[in-house]
Image (cartoon, rainbow, N blue to C red):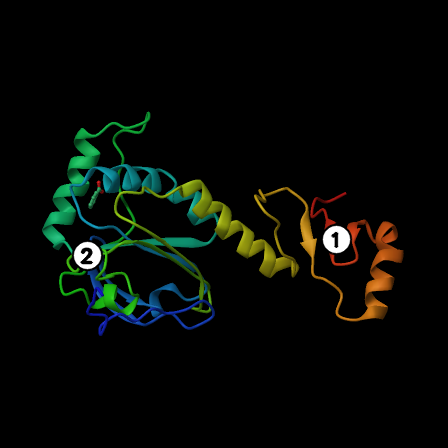
Amino acid sequence: MEQYNCTKVHLPLIGESAPEFEADTTQGRIKFPDDYRGKWVILFSHPADFTPVCTTEFMTFASMEKEFEALNCKLIGLSIDSHYSHIAWLRTIKEKIEYKGMKNIEVNFPVIADVKMEVAHKFGMVQSAASDVSPVRAVFFIDPQAKVRAIIFYPASLGRNFQEIKRALIAMQTADAYKVATPADWQPGDDVIVPPPGSCGAAKERVEGAQREGIKCLDWFLCFKSLKLK
Ligand code: BEZ
């Protein structure tokens, strides 16, 4: 049987406080969560600088940074490359790479130079069965209270879908704001799910009063409503 050294793997789970850290980045030193109070944070790792999939990811994410800013969300990248490698790679991206109509792309969000893998290990980003020397593609969604709300892990060969990352962020913000849930393949503007009633009486009331409340029920436990202002 294969054995992996998992002694250092620590994975903060959904609902837990995200581990605190201080780190040097391409935008100076950052302190998490202190520098990010009241904001959503997407902390993501990439396996290495100057690699093809990571380059397409960085260009895509950087080109969407303002969209995340508008959602009160800060981006933080991480790899275990050095600060100078990060600077050289980001300069190359800006000066030389054109991809899917994106060019002259400046990466303005901080990228952590985690050469000692301190932050990567705190977030379980280095997964020995995949690699001991580079992080997987991790995405941690961290809310304004510094709680982990969602996690995505992809292998090195699989570039992430940044529209899905944005959709997931908006879905969680919507769920928080309106105390609702979002159905399969939900997109902003679609109907949301009203939490199921907690008692038989409430179930009866839900179904009988659905039309009056503007709720569409497929059954007592599966009811939708629109968030659009009428
Ligand atoms: C890439 O970004 O292309 C990549 C990085 C590490 C391993 C394989 C692919």
Which part of the image, by quadrant, shows the N terminus?
A: bottom left
**Residue named by callout 1:** 223
Q: Residue 97: where, in percent of width, then height? A: 21, 30
- Checking the image for residue 131, the label placed there is 2
Label 1 beta carbon within 8 A of ligand 1? no
Q: Residue at x 25, y 50 (%)?
A: 46
Q: Residue at x 65, y 61 (%)?
A: 179
In the displayed structure image, the side of residue 225 where residue 178 appears, left or right:
left
Instruction: Give whichever of discs 1 and 2 has the lower sequence position.
Output: 2
Q: Residue at x 76, y 65 (%)?
A: 197
Which part of the image, by quadrant, shows the C terminus?
A: top right
Quadrant of the rendered image containing residue 113: bottom left
Q: Residue 227: where, in percent of width, then height? A: 69, 48
Q: Quadrant of ligand 1?
A: top left
- Checking the image for residue 128, the label placed there is none
| Amino acid identity at mark 1 | Cys
User: In terms of secondary structure, where does tag 1 sit?
Assistant: strand
Which of the pair 22/218 is nearer the observer?
Answer: 218
Q: Residue 87: where, in percent of width, then height? A: 15, 46
Quadrant of the rendered image containing residue 114: bottom left
In the displayed structure image, the side of residue 60 where residue 68 appears, left or right:
right
Label 2 beta carbon within 8 A of ligand 1? no
**Of the residues tagged 1 and 2, which is closer to the observer?**
2
